[in-house]
Amino acid sequence: MKIGLDLTNLKGCVGEKDFQALLPRMTKTHEDLHSGSGKGAEFTGWLNLPSQTDKAFLAELRTLGEKVRKTSDCIISIGIGGSYIGIRAALDFLSREQKLPVYYAGHNLSAGYLQDLFAKLKNKRVAVLVISKSGTTTEPALAFRLVKQFMESKYSAAQLKQRIICITDEKKGALRAIANEQGYRTYPIADNIGGRFSVLAPVGLVPLAIAGIDVSSLVKGAQDAERELAQPGFATNLAWQYAASRYLLYQQKKSIEIMSFFYEEMDFIAEWWKQLFGESEGKEGQGIFPASANFTADLHSMGQLIQEGERNLFETFVVVKDTGHKLLVPKDKVNQDNFNCVAGKNLDWVNEQAYKATAMAHFEGGVPNMTITLPKFDAYTLGQLFYFYQKAVALTGYLMGVNPFNQPGVEAYKSKMFALLGRK
Amino acid sequence: MKIGLDLTNLKGCVGEKDFQALLPRMTKTHEDLHSGSGKGAEFTGWLNLPSQTDKAFLAELRTLGEKVRKTSDCIISIGIGGSYIGIRAALDFLSREQKLPVYYAGHNLSAGYLQDLFAKLKNKRVAVLVISKSGTTTEPALAFRLVKQFMESKYSAAQLKQRIICITDEKKGALRAIANEQGYRTYPIADNIGGRFSVLAPVGLVPLAIAGIDVSSLVKGAQDAERELAQPGFATNLAWQYAASRYLLYQQKKSIEIMSFFYEEMDFIAEWWKQLFGESEGKEGQGIFPASANFTADLHSMGQLIQEGERNLFETFVVVKDTGHKLLVPKDKVNQDNFNCVAGKNLDWVNEQAYKATAMAHFEGGVPNMTITLPKFDAYTLGQLFYFYQKAVALTGYLMGVNPFNQPGVEAYKSKMFALLGRK
């Protein structure tokens, strides 16, 4: 693994002895997951997905991307939840690699948002991606109606056929029916991979390839993680370490985990992580509440509470070692602010010191914390990170005794909303 | 008050009887705050600030704004915490009123972020606002060094004097010294108003006026709220209702409050609220953890956990009655998605149904919730909202027995960081 995990600041809460005590259960958990004998095994298609992704498919995506970018100035990606957050997380993280602007739709029900979007893209060459397994989820379904109307004002039916791509169920559902009827190009959403586990499936790979991301490297990172994290044992398996630490902290009434990061490129990595962990664990009256902090900004907002508030928190920092950026702090003749001590230093080096100081201060303040270290903002690293988190949450879910792959509670508001909308 | 508060979905957790039982303490709390006999009374300058803001000052700001907009294409606003979030919250909320783009700096330590910003503004006419009481807070101090270097590459010293405005301490501190030396225009930061309570002070009003926001309406809304919320009593005082409800829920081990909203314009209102409440209450081992959810997107990520996870949550919805936007759902001949039931309806109406369904579903799932209703996305409403929250958090802080106006824990990481930076 190119990514690292530092558990030093769990001292006093989680240690080697605790891991050893958990070893039999952890071993069983790992076996249950890999043998398909655990809860929700019918949704573990993500487990061996990277190694099963073939090169021909990746080559096809590269060609597709080149073709779309040649004829379009941007793409509208319609989707919500697992059909939205992972894509946005990857594009934000890899923003400097991105070659085609991606605009999102179908992740809200805001008239103003779509009006602004249409006004902005009025004179652009637009391609559209619709991502929905059923085609009947309210937000993307209504957005697709409106985006289609917008596209019809710009293009003929024949042109639309070239400009709309659907990612949907292979056989059934409303979007499949629409795609078949209209002759849109499609990519499949498999039955055995849930939305929040799908960023390394076509749901994520197709839009990322179109945006110009090197999806082969992304998959390569995930493959290497898959192989390494298939090996049981606390000594080397980072997913074991992270999963067990979280579980043990939760047993100690640490009911909130804050993912803290220091670069805005990671905003949506945190959102993706929140869905993955919140939706997988948050059931049957339990689950760690996932929150995020964008440092150092949030040190000046949430910092006080983290340092001295209720001690029901633990924290996981995600830091990037080599950001690839350099901006040196200028020297000031008068030095009123007294910061000539860092003149000539890279600003990102100062940021790194802020991380070190914060991890130490929060630990001393009673917030146990871990640090995930990423080498770079690149696709290979991201592939490892995505897979690592997926593997870890499956393990914690099993340790907690829940099915980490379902989401029965999401239906509650939907059925009430359908009643209010008069939809049968 | 033009804003409303609906407590229906607190049923079973907080009711009229609980309010009556709390009445003596609440009355005392209110009196302590208004008489200046409570904790941290030296920082309650915000309490009567709106009524003390005079028209001449507002007129001056209007003129300043017109002048800056005439000579600049954009402004860089340098600040962090209370010198950043409130401004951004207001501008996002009022984005359709905004006349001048505002870019932020000094809220992070990211080299890539500033490099991108400078590249973007290279050929623009730029004005700069530096907001810092001391001038020695690391993030804005270093950002100001770098922004100054960028500005010096574009402008002469004489031009800079016209383009840089400082908001800082009236007498002391590094930024005051710099401003005096260079002859920059300044606006004051008073000693008796903490950063998170300063959005209605010059810290907020100056940048908002420059951006073209109608700050007179903002202040008018706050004035009306100030007058109304000065009257004690549960029947009519919404700040009492909100403060007491939160306090009573926290007594029942509801340790996380989620602010849930349905329009992206409110993203930073939530961030501002998180700082205000987290920093005011989060001390001495207590405090409600403030989190936010951006619906309906987050119904497809955090929705499962909210519906069925650990029952340590309560939720406050903030909804906007009249968004001012209209986009009708088109009818579809084939109706594969079965949404012709809402054809011809405004998308924002569908959003409203989503809110109603969610509030009901979460209540039934064991998440007590309240709803703050805002009439519109306008400055008057926002002024009321800002003041309402400030008043409420002061009351809850006192009920919890803490000083809601200090932030001693923020120093912990700073002192460690200064050591790592070699700063004395």
Image: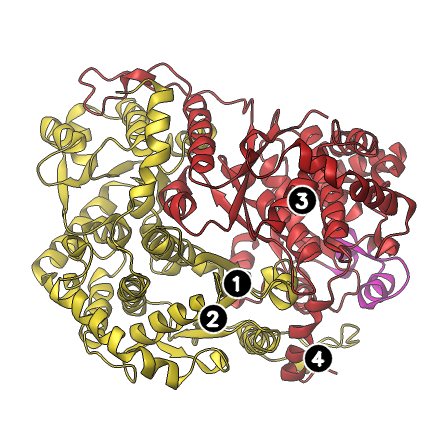
Chain colours: A yellow, B red
Q: Residues within 10 Å of mark 3 (few under 14, many from 20)?
A: some
> Quick check: B75 left or right of A123?
right
**Amino acid type, label 1:** Gln
Look at the numbered disc 2 and give the secondary structure of its residue. loop
Of pointers 3 and 1, the one earlier in the residue sequence: 3
Q: Which residues are magenta?
A: B156-184
**Residue to which mark 2 is pinned:** A325
Task: Give the Cα distance between marks 2 and 1.
Answer: 8 Å
Give me the disc on residue B115: 1
Look at the numbered disc 3 and give the secondary structure of its residue. loop
Q: Nearer the viewer, residue A357 or B150?
A: A357
Q: Are marks 3 and 4 in contact (CB under 8 Å)?
A: no
Whether residue B337 appears in this view of the structure is: yes
Of pointers 4 and 2, the one earlier in the residue sequence: 2
> Quick check: B202 left or right of B301?
right
Quadrant the C terminus of chain A occupies: top left
Reply above or below: B80 against B342. Answer: below
**Amino acid type, label 4:** Asn
Task: Give the Cα distance between marks 1 and 4.
Answer: 21 Å
Task: Give the Cα distance between marks 3 and 1.
Answer: 20 Å
**Residue to which mark 4 is pinned:** A340
Q: Residues within 10 Å of mark 2 (few under 14, many from 20)?
A: some
Does A144 appear in magenta? no
The structure residue drawn at horizontal position 55% and vertical position 64%, both measured from the top left corner, is A295
Q: Residues within 10 Å of mark 4 (few under 14, many from 20)?
A: some
**Residue to which mark 3 is pinned:** B72
**Chain identity of mark 1:** B
**Chain identity of mark 4:** A
Look at the numbered disc 4 and give the secondary structure of its residue. helix
**Chain identity of mark 2:** A
**Amino acid type, label 3:** Ser
Q: Position of residue A149 (x, y in %)?
A: 29, 23
